[in-house]
Amino acid sequence: MKFTLSWLKEHLETDATLEQIAEKLTMIGLEVEDVSDPAARLAPFKIARVIEAVQHPNADRLRVLKVDTGEGDPIQVVCGAPNARTGLVGVLGKPGDYVPGLDVTLSVGKIRDVESFGMMCSERELELSDEHNGIIDLPEDAPVGMSYAQWLGLDDPVIEIGLTPNRPDCTGVYGIARDLAAAGLGKLKERKAEPVRGSFPCPTKVEFAFGDTHPLCKAFGLRLVKGVKNGPSPKWMQDRLRAIGLRPINTLVDITNYMTFDQGRPLHVFDAAKVAGNLIVRRAVEGESIEGLNGKTYQLDPSICVISDNNGIESLGGILGGEHSGCTETTTDVLIESALWDENGIAATGRKLGVNTDARYRFERGVDPDFMQPGLEMATRLVLDLCGGEASELEVTGKVPDATKIIDFPYAEVKRLSGIDVSVAEINVTLKALGFWLSGSGDVVKVAAPSWRPDIEGKADLVEEVVRIIGLDRVVSTPLPRTSSISGKVLTLGQIRRNRARRSLASRGLNEAITWSFIAKATAEAFGGGKPELALANPISADLSDMRPSLLPGLLAAAQRNADRGYPDVALFEIGQIFAGDAPEDQSMAAAGIRRGTAKLQGAARHWSGSSASVDVFDAKADAEAVLAAIGAPVDKLQVFRDAPDYFHPGRSGALKLGPKNTLAVFGEIHPRTLALLDIEGPVVAFEIFPDNLPQPKGKATRSKGALDTSGLMPVRRDFAFVVKKDVSAETLLKAARGADKALITDVNLFDIYEGKGVAEDSKSIAIDVTLQPRQKTLTDEEIDAVAKKVIATVEKATGGTLRS
């Protein structure tokens, strides 16, 4: 919402400065977004008179001017304008002045060997219009030496405020002045809307034709003014409209625009000669269209309210007038409309047609219903004063709804909700200044909101009105009490684990991504989801219809989008919620990551030493184990199982578990079938970790670390190779070897799997190295052999295999 300072002072008697007004507006909730002075950039340019103009000695199209600036001796200016002449009064720019239309700063220069000490300016060079056929030609009585901007009346600051949707009363300058007066910044001037006595009945009638459907118009006022003389509006009106960014058109149209911004009351004018018969307010018929005043054609349907006559549709009700019945300079009879439109209908029509007008902006927020008829009277008076003519009686159809709302208001609510001690007298004065009606006495009174405040619903709204007017600076600053002890941890265990996981993944070269929590139903089904209870009732689009059961679909799609744009080797991770059902316990936290192409830990793409290999299952497993270690999982106790989900490649995937039932992570290469379903090119490996499945850490009695448990004796390593059936997992063998002697065996590693010559077709050879760490003394050969026999016996019993000879 924009307005000028002089415009505001037309409704507000105040001696406050611009700075004080801007500060008070922000304090009462009408935040000032910008204060601009159009004259600031034109301040250096002064009115000057050409006292002599002679032909340039070296150029046919140039003249050498002697210019009286009103200050000291005349100066010499070289000018090429065709209208440069002796006696011309124009606008002069001196060296050092910035010319906005040319984006240059003037300096003393020579033009064809003749010095020039300034520039006579055109309107386009000062960005006042597109006129550039000659320099500015002012009346002879224009005061030489005076600021051109001041003489033109441009020295009027423009204030722009940001309105929240609940303040339709401040979509007019009068409403803003009313708030400032209530805040003690001046006195509000009385709004005059004296009725205009009609000298004849209005010949055009108005009919509502909504049938059994919801009416999209509540009330409609109409008046004919005949014998008007339309033309350019007065300079004061044009200046105000231009200052807020509107283009003056003609007096009748400018009056409606002026009323929209001055009083917050949108109006419309029809050329009565172009209206055939009565006006019918109805819903549009499917297939109808209208050419608007903006030159665009709109296709309509029954959800849209229109004003029609015997010629067809003349206007989009409350939004946009039609080109056919618009007023021009030839208009002699005019119909002035002031109506109350359905707010929801206006908003829906505006969104559907993509039309944003000043009228829509106000009607969809809710205009003052009680000002419908006074606004029409005020507009009629302006038409009669500026265009002449004779007015008819009012034609009113429908009924203005009663907007009165009575609220029981306990004075104590102000203290309870705001913490400010405000006297009853001050509360009463504030509310009455804002237009509220109060009745009763005692601790609770009845308050009625004015018709221009549809946002007031209850007592909390009344408290807000009191507090914003008296000032939030009245809230007393009270320090929080200092606690006697240091507070405990601020972050929860889950937050700590997520932060550690995020840091660990970032350190391994993965970039964090944030993807939608919604995915397509087919994708959800492919990743174990797609349950009916997880389908969205009102999805953003068909591709975002279901809550995600996994983080991987979003990451896979993001990786492919990068590949489509020339970045195929990407490594991404995300930490977020996944959903197994609609119950609270079905929502859990997960951390997932993917690597595509050659995006290995060592680096992606080509290298001087050779092409990098593609990512594989072991890259995903390493990432998963690194994150689990970072968040405190007992990595040394994890077991690898084959039962990864179906969207992973069988044989190239696995699950990390604590026991057979507690899955901490899954990892592997994404199945080609899954990649084809998502239209994604591989290879892609991925992992997903479930931090909620980690056991709670055991409480520690003290903050000190445990004793360092090291041995001064050298460890002993022995290698074993076992022949087992192909269906025996390596994890089973490793677990058996670790349990052979828990006191001495500290580590068991797999280093070879062999199938082929020398091994039966249904078997394989698994080689491991076992580390023995003595604690008390150096082991003898006999003791080492005894442990080796335990390992062999334990593995053979657990796997059914034999030691390879």
Image (tube, rainbow, N blue to C red):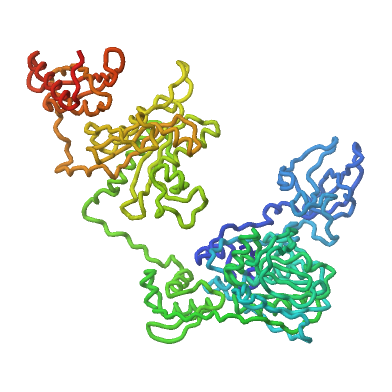
Q: Nearer the viewer, residue 317 or 722?
A: 722
Q: Is residue 251 above or below residue 132?
A: below
Q: Residue furthest front?
A: 761
71 on left or right of 34: right
Asked if residue 763 is positioned above or below residue 417 in the image, the reply reads: above
Q: Is residue 191 above or below residue 691?
A: below
Q: Tally the marks.
A: 0
Image side of residue 97 versus residue 487, left or right: right
* The quarter of the displayed image where residue 160 is located: bottom right
- In which quadrant is the C terminus drawn? top left
- Residue 116: quadrant of the picture: top right
The x, y position of residue 420, in whole percent, is 38, 70
Q: Residue 49: which quarter of the image?
A: bottom right
Which sits in the foreground, 46 or 300? 300
Q: Quadrant where the N terminus lies?
A: bottom right
Q: Position of residue 48 (x, y in %)?
A: 81, 54
Residue 637 position in % (x across, y down)? 22, 33
Any part of residue 3 in sight? yes
Q: Is residue 786 above or below residue 704?
A: above
**Can you give x and y, in whole percent of width and height, for residue 698 in the image?**
18, 43
Q: Of residues 405 and 466, which is closer to you in this image?
A: 405
> Residue at 73% across / 47% down in the picture?
99
Tell whether 77 sits left or right of 786: right
> Which of the two residues, 620 or 225, is positioned nearer the viewer here?
620
> Residue at horizontal 67%, vertical 77%?
208
Q: Is residue 176 visible?
A: no
Could you tell me which residue is drawn at 64 percent across and 64 percent down?
3
